[in-house]
C-alpha cells in the first residue's frame, strides 16, 4: 500500500513506537487480513503517488485520496470509504471567517490535493484574489501558518479538526458552503479488477458487521 504517511489522523508515524498508524492504516490492515494477506506500507510523497501505483511500486493507494474524475482516468477507485470536505484553517486570531476573507491573503496548500484544486477554483472562478503557496506535504502547509508565512490553508476537514484540537491557540477552522463533499477511495491499477472487486466486497462486509464503525470510532469518536 502506497501512502503519504504525514497526514494525521489518516496516516502518520507514532512518535513513540516509530510505527505507522491511523485510520487508513487500520482500515487497510483489516481489509488485507480478511483477504488472507499482510499489508506492507510504502511511505510515498504525494506528488508521484499515482505514478508509483501505475509503475507497480505498490498494489493500492490508501492515503485519504479523494475520488476525482481526473484521477479516475489513471486509476480505478474502490467504493467510497469516507466522506470529507475542504475547510479553511487559519491562525486562531485571524479575521478570516469565510472564503471571501481570503482576498489579498497568502493561502498554503499541499500541492496536487483537492485543497490545491479548491484554492485555484476560488481564484479563477470565484474571482477571490489570493496568493497560493504550494508545499509537498500538509505538515509544511500547517507550519507555514504557524510561522506566519501563510494566513491560512485549505485542507481536508478532519485533518484540520485534529490540528485545532492539538493546538487551539494556534489554529481555528473556518467552514464554508463553497466546499462540496468529497469521498475517499482506495486506488487500484486499472489492470487489476480482481483486487478491486475483492476490496469492495470486504469493505461492504466490514461496514455491515460493525468493524468499520469500530475503526471509525477509534479515530473519530468522542472521547
Ligand atoms: N483528500 C485530498 C486529496 O485527495 C488530500 C489527501 C492527502 N493525503 C495525504 N496522505 N497527504 O487530494
Image (spheres, rainbow, N blue to C red):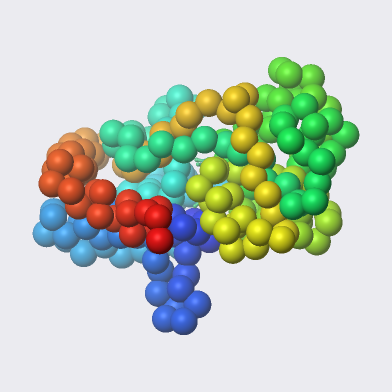
At horizontal 37% and vertical 54% (from top left) the residue drawn is 221
Picture coordinates of residue 80 (x, y %)?
Answer: 33, 35
Point out the image quarter for the N terminus. Answer: bottom left
Q: Position of residue 61 (x, y in %)?
A: 38, 48
Number of marks drawn? 0
In the picture shown, does residue 32 fall above or below 127? Answer: below
Determine the residue located farthest toward the front in the rendered image: 223
> What residue is drawn where x is 44% and y is 78%?
18
For the C terminus, the quadrant is bottom left
Asked whether residue 195 appears in the rendered view, the answer is no
For residue 78, which quarter of the picture? top left
* Residue at (42% x, 27% y) in the render: 73
6 vs 187, left or right, is right
Farthest right residue?
104
- Relative to residue 199, is residue 125 depicted above or below? above
In depth, the one of 83 and 42 nearer the eye is 83
Q: Is residue 28 left or right of residue 136?
A: left
Residue 127 drawn above or below residue 21: above
Residue at figure coordinates x 71%, y 18% from the top left: 125
Left or right: residue 91 versus residue 175 is right
199 over 181 or under it: above or below:
below
Q: Is residue 100 visible?
A: yes
Looking at the rendering, which quadrant does residue 175 occupy? top right
The spot of residue 65 in percent (x, y) is: 45, 42
Amino acid at each position: 500500500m502506497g501512502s503519504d504517511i504525514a497526514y494525521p489522523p489518516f496516516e502518520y508515524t507514532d512518535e513513540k513506537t516509530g510505527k505507522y498508524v491511523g485510520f487508513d492504516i487500520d482500515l487497510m490492515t483489516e481489509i488485507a487480513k480478511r483477504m488472507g494477506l499482510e499489508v506492507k506500507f510504502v511511505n510515498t510523497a504525494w506528488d508521484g503517488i499515482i505514478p508509483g501505483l501505475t509503475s507497480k511500486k505498490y498494489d493500492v493507494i490508501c492515503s485519504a485520496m479523494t475520488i476525482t474524475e481526473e484521477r479516475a482516468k489513471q486509476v480505478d477507485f474502490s467504493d467510497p470509504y469516507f466522506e470529507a470536505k475542504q475547510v479553511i484553517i487559519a491562525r486562531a486570531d485571524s479575521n478570516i471567517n469565510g472564503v471571501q476573507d481570503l482576498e489579498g491573503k497568502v493561502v498554503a496548500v499541499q500541492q496536487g490535493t483537492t485543497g490545491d484544486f479548491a484554492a485555484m477554483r476560488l481564484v479563477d472562478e470565484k474571482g477571490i484574489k489570493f496568493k497560493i503557496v504550494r508545499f509537498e506535504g500538509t505538515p509544511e502547509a500547517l507550519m507555514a501558518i504557524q510561522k506566519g508565512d501563510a494566513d491560512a490553508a485549505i485542507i481536508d476537514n478532519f485533518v484540520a479538526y485534529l490540528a485545532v484540537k492539538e493546538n487551539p491557540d494556534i489554529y481555528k477552522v473556518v467552514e464554508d458552503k463553497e466546499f462540496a463533499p468529497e469521498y475517499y477511495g482506495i486506488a487500484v491499477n486499472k489492470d487489476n479488477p480482481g483486487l478491486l472487486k475483492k476490496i469492495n466486497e470486504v469493505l461492504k462486509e466490514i461496514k455491515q458487521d460493525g468493524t468499520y464503525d469500530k475503526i471509525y470510532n477509534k479515530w473519530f469518536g468522542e472521547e
